[in-house]
Amino acid sequence: MNWTETDDRPILLELFASEGGSTLGYQKAGWRVCALDNVAKHARRNPAEAWLTGDAIQALDTLLAGGELEFATGGGWTERIGLTGHHRGPRLPALPGLHRGPAG
């Protein structure tokens, strides 16, 4: 899969991605997956289109402070994403069906 300007699939940030069991499901559902795990060998085995080895809590702190994360992609490219979107496109879409409310 490529990360071109014409790729309009939504981006999913997968924390604690491990070796990618969930990643495959997200990809089949139409997401571009940016996977993050703190174990480097997991990143090498994960089938995500982009990956980052690092600490999930530190990554969330960076995003919440308005920063971006830089993920490696195949072919030596990088992809920078933040909470308001990524450098090649508009804001990330809302996740349908998810809302705050009482459980039950």
Image (cartoon, rainbow, N blue to C red):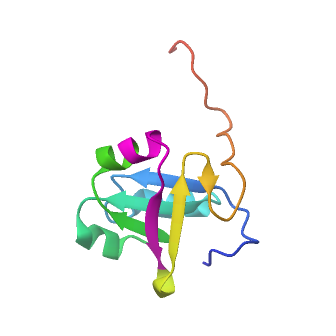
**Residue 31 seen from this side:** yes
Look at 39% across and 64% down and name the residue there.
20
**Residue 48 seen from this side:** no
Q: Where is residue 36 in the image (x, y as percent from the top left)?
A: 37, 59
Q: Is residue 67 magenta?
A: yes
The reply, left or right, for residue 50 in relation to residue 5 is left
Q: Which residue lies furthest to the right in this view?
A: 6
Front-most of residues 7 and 82: 82
Q: Where is residue 77 in the image (x, y as percent from the top left)?
A: 51, 80
Quadrant housing the N terminus? bottom right
Placement of 62 over or under 34, stated as above or below: above
Q: Position of residue 104 (x, y in %)?
A: 52, 14
Q: Is residue 56 magenta?
A: no
Look at 31% across and 47% down and name the residue there.
58
Front-most of residues 61 and 17: 61
The reply, left or right, for residue 68 in relation to residue 38 is right
Q: Magenta region: which residues?
A: 61-73
Placement of 99 over or under 2, stated as above or below: above
Q: Where is residue 71 in the image (x, y as percent from the top left)?
A: 45, 67
Q: Which image quadrant for residue 3?
A: bottom right
Q: Residue furthest front?
A: 66
Look at 33% across and 52% down and name the residue there.
16
Placement of 56 over or under 77, stated as above or below: above
Q: Count the numbered circles shown.
A: 0
Placement of 37 over or under 1, stated as above or below: above
